[in-house]
Amino acid sequence: MAKSNIAIAKVCFLILSHVCSQYVVSHTMVKFLPGFEGPLPFQLETGYVGVDESEDVQLFYYFVKSERNPKEDPLLIWLTGGPGCSTLSALLYEIGPLKFNVVEYTGSLPTLLLNPNSWTKVSSIIFVDSPVGTGFSYARSQHASQTGDLKQVHHLRQFLMKWLMVHPEFLSNQVYLGGDSYSGLTVPVLIQEISKGNEEGANPLINMQGYVLGNPITVPTLESNSAIPFAHGMGLISDELYESLRINCGGEYQTIDPSNEECLNDLLAYHKSISGINSAHILEPVCAFASRKPQEMSKRSLIDQLQGFVDPEPTLPTIGCRTYGYLLSHYWVNDENVRKALHIQEGSIGKWLRCNYGIPYTTEISNSFPFHVNLSAKGYRSLIYTMAIMTLLCHSLRLKHGQEL
Ligand SMILES: *[C@@H]1O[C@H](CO)[C@@H](O)[C@H](O)[C@H]1NC(C)=O
């Protein structure tokens, strides 16, 4: 800890003496993690970056250096959805270097294995717990705990600039942003902000190249008619049913004329076809979800629920389900020695939640489509992929047939 603080003071003194107090960044190398045998075979750093005027918003991050050539490889900043889901999900279940050894929980600390497909084989990744209130990120005042889309974007831009100031060896690396689900709304706006800042001569300049989004939200659910063409493209419904839907519903699957019997019957057949499919991962079965029942469902978390990110019933998943791994994370991360190893500030948060749906959060961006258009025109590269099938909200269908789908 002391070592890193000296490095920060130097940066402040030479470059930023006038705003030195804004650059309190604590970071520490993590050599061992409970549950993983031996020293970690990759470089992991964890830390906090204080953002907002008073630094009362403390954003926690995990940084994994590229295992190939960190000097040349891109730097990726990764966000998880929710809003309110910890970025540890990305590190342990998606693109990071570690994964759980998924065996039945018997009361001892879950163990970790290496993920041979980690994206850190070719890039350095900063996994950020954002917005404040997510994972290990915390607020030092009531005021600072209030957040939303635009605040989050503002905080993340500050985060990135401050992080780069204390890691100047990465200033010349190509930078990419990435995330999934809800990040589909915030990432394009964040890139536009960074791009604007660069054009206005911000210091440091961020060498922004593009973005990667998985299962992203782009337009409001009720305006999207893409689920059925997607289901057809993925082979989840037959050519015959798709043709019939297309003709009978005229391509409009959200706002349906209740007297259009043919369309309603086709939609019912569609829902029957996909009912056993995990909506967030179409290649996996429907599983119970290891997440708490949210006290109050926001509009956004309702969307997540429909996408299969949250199960309204607090039932236990069975082993073999992706969600069993989610359950293990609660036992692992909330272990005192794990929190010590990760250098979590004592007393900063209570119990760690994989997804915290209790964050006071204002949704402000409902459609990121125009931002995608602008970013493409500016030459930013993007990769957008999906394994999720959005559930249609067919009220008229329910009314008509008097049944829940
Ligand atoms: C896209 O770019 C145009 C032209 O610079 C600008 O007027 C518009 O506000 C931008 N759209 C968004 C969503 O920021």
Image (spheres, rainbow, N blue to C red):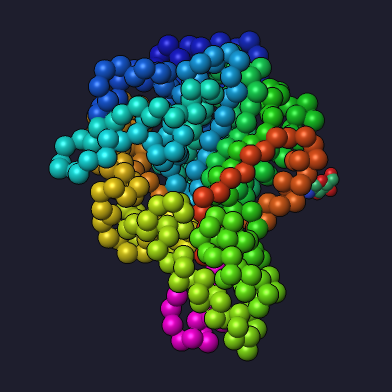
216 or 131: which is nearer to us? 216
> Does the magenta portion include 394?
yes
**Relative to 373, is 65 above or below?**
above
Q: Quadrant of the N terminus?
A: top left
Inspect this view and state whether residue 222 appears: no
Q: Relative to residue 136, is residue 383 drawn left or right?
A: right
Assign the C terminus to one quadrant of the image. Answer: bottom left
Query: In the rendered structure, which segment of residues is drawn in magenta?
Result: 392-405
Residue 44 percent coordinates (x, y): 41, 22
**The quadrant where residue 4 appears:** top left
Point out residue 138 in the picture as x, y percentages from the top left corner: 44, 40
Residue in front for this viewpoint, 312 or 198: 312
| 215 w.r.t. 298: above or below | above
Question: Which residue occupies the foreground of this view, 129 or 66?
Answer: 66
Residue 164, image x, y percentages: 59, 22
Give me the residue at 68% from left, 44% from top.
189
Q: Position of residue 339 (x, y in %)?
A: 30, 32
Q: State yes or no: residue 120 in magenta.
A: no
Q: For the image shown, how many numbered marks are present on the structure?
A: 0
Q: Describe residue 19's horizontal placement relative to residue 55 as left or right.
A: right
- Is 41 placed left or right of 128 in the picture? left
Residue that lies at the very extreme toward the front in this rendered image: 240
Q: Which residue is depicted at the point 76% across and 47% down? A: 373
For image coordinates 54% across by 65% down, the residue present is 238
Does residue 261 appear in this view? yes
Q: Residue at x 40, y 63 (%)?
A: 276
| In the image, residue 77 above or below residue 303 | above
